[in-house]
Amino acid sequence: MNAPRILLVGLCIVWGACAGRQVAPLQRYSLGMARAEYRDYSDARVDLCDGEPRWLGDELSSVNGLLSRFLANTREAATPQSLQHAEHLELLKEASRTLSPVMETHRKNLAALSECGFRRTGAFPELARRGAELLELSKARLTEASSAVAAAELLKAQKKWAEEAPAREAAAKETWCAPNPKLGHGELYFARQYPNGRTEWLFCDGVMVEESAGGEPQLVTPEWLPSRERRRIQPQRYLDAAKAYPASEIDRQPGSTPSSPEGQASRSN
């Protein structure tokens, strides 16, 4: 047998090509800084147990490593206060789009491994145990993705609400108040409910009605107002105006629960 023939026979033995056996193509996947190489043995013509155990061990270990890094690098995705929150959230969002097919292939490969004669040899028992554990943890982490993204978006909206609050108040005052409002007329131009439940109704003449969470509305007059001027203020006019102000128009932090005008009315009666 000449040298080329010997080489061809050798390749046939390694690859199984001469017997009609196919080798699953090597696939590569990256997630953030993590990389994995693996094969999909689910094709009926490809038997995972007929492959080279050393290669299979490397492939299973590669995906296990990627899943482990995924879990480590997304653990703060649902913790907005964390310094790593933004980075972890972005990785979780990327994983929610691309990781599931890799996990499904890994699950099938681990299931197929249980039928192999070498399944209890070398590192395979630990690879199988750890792989099953990582798949469950990763599945749970991906399930959290939508709620983590929603929480991050809500926090972003709340910060924007707080930053833009002075501008909204100023715009309302410019729109609804005369240049020189008369004390005692009770023109209401803006109302805001704070995250702690406190609500305030602002009037053009500087008077304010304030209500703490679960408390009764109280009239608050400007400290700079002279005593003789205070007599021009009729408290009930302001309290009635605050009570009648549409609850839907009260400026609230996104995600907060509005206090209903019916509830206010029931406390007053």
Image: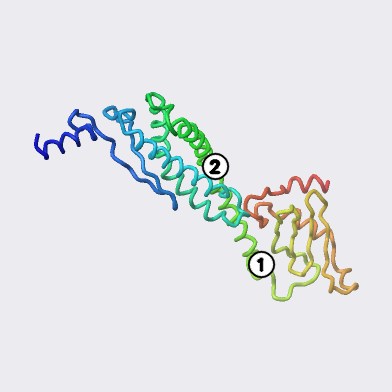
Binning the other alpha carbons within 10 Å of mark 2 as few (below 14), some (14 to 19) or many (20 upward) gives some
Q: Is residue 193 above or below residue 189?
A: above
Q: Position of residue 243 (x, y in %)?
A: 76, 53
The residue sitting at the left extreme is 2
Residue in front for this viewpoint, 11 or 87: 11
Q: Position of residue 254 (x, y in %)?
A: 62, 53
Q: Quadrant of residue 60?
A: top left
Q: Is residue 248 above or below residue 229?
A: above
- Name the colour scheme: rainbow
- Looking at the rendered structure, the kind of residue marked 2 is Glu
**Left or right of residue 268, residue 81 in this image:** left
Q: Secondary structure at mark 2?
A: loop
At horizontal 79% and vertical 44% (from top left) the residue drawn is 266
The residue sitting at the right extreme is 227
Residue in front for this viewpoint, 129 or 254: 129
Binning the other alpha carbons within 10 Å of mark 1 as few (below 14), some (14 to 19) or many (20 upward) gives few
Q: Secondary structure at mark 1?
A: helix
At horizontal 81% and vertical 46% (from top left) the residue drawn is 267
At horizontal 54% and vertical 49% (from top left) the residue drawn is 149
Q: Position of residue 101 (x, y in %)?
A: 39, 39
**Left or right of residue 263, residue 231 in this image:** right
Residue that mark 2 sits on: 144
**Left or right of residue 88, residue 111 in this image:** left
What's the distance in space between the residues labelled 1 and 2, CA to CA? 35 Å
Residue in front for this viewpoint, 3 or 17: 3
Label 1 or label 2, whichever comes before in sequence order: 2
Residue in front for this viewpoint, 14 or 97: 14
- Looking at the rendered structure, the kind of residue marked 1 is Pro
Residue that mark 1 sits on: 166
